[in-house]
Amino acid sequence: MDNQTKYWKDFLNSDNDALAKLYVDLFEPLVLKAIYYTKNPEVARDIVSSLFVSLIELPYEERCKRWERIENHQALLIAIVRNKCLDHLKISQNRARINSELFSAVTTDTETAAMIAHLTICIEELKNDDKELVEMHLQGFNNTEISEKLNLSEKTVRNKLSLTRKSLSKLWHQLVVIIALIWN
C-alpha cells in the first residue's frame, strides 16, 4: 500500500493529520487539473482549498458512509475538483448572462454615467481600508497583487472583498430606494 492510500484510510478513520499529508501530496496536481477547467490559477486554488476544507469538516460517520469502499481516492478527488470547476463555470456564465441582461437595459451614456456616479457614492461610504481594497480591485489588480501591496494574506483579501461587496450591495440598494423616494 502506498503512502497516499494509507493516508486516505487513516483520514477515513478520523485522522485529520493524514488529510494534511494528502493535502501536501495532492494540492498542486489537483490545482493543475482545476486550472485546466477554469483557466484561472486563483480560482483553481480556491476550489481545491475548499475541497480539503469540506473534507476535514465532514464528520467521521459521514466519511465512512460515503467513501469506505472507494479504492482510488485520487480519481475521486479529481472527479470532485472537476465537478466543482464545472459548477463554478456554470455559475460564472449565469452571472455574466444576468449582468448582461441587466446592463443591456442601460442604453444611454447618461444612464451609465449616473450608475457610475451612484457606485462612486457607495464606495465613498466604505471604510478607508475597504475603499482602498475596492479601488485596487476596480483598477484591475488581482488578489495576489493586492495582498502584496497591502501586506495582507491572499485569503484575507478575498474575505475582505467578499464582505465589501455585500456592503456595497446594501449601500446601492439604500441609494436606489432613496432616489426612488425623491423622484416619487
Image (spheres, helix red, strand yellow):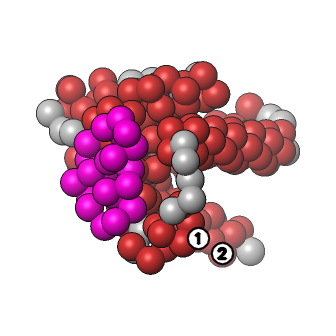
Residue drawn at 69 percent across, 69 percent down: 180
Report crowding for label 1: few under 14, some 14 to 19, many 20 or more residues within 10 A (C-alpha). few
> Secondary structure beneath disc 1?
helix
Residue drawn at 31 percent across, 67 percent down: 14
**What is the quadrant of residue 173 in the picture?**
bottom right
Pointer 2 residue: 181
- Asked if residue 97 is among those painted magenta in the image, a careful observer would answer no
Query: Which mark is on residue 88?
Result: none
Q: Which residues are magenta?
A: 1-21
Pointer 1 residue: 178
Residue drawn at 46 percent across, 67 percent down: 63
In front of the other: 147 or 118: 147
Picture coordinates of residue 3, whole percent (x, y):
31, 37
In front of the other: 158 or 66: 66
Q: CA distance from mark 1 to mark 2?
A: 5 Å
Amino acid at circle 1: Ile
**What is the quadrant of residue 23 in the picture?**
top left
**What is the quadrant of residue 12 in the picture?**
bottom left
Report crowding for label 2: few under 14, some 14 to 19, many 20 or more residues within 10 A (C-alpha). few
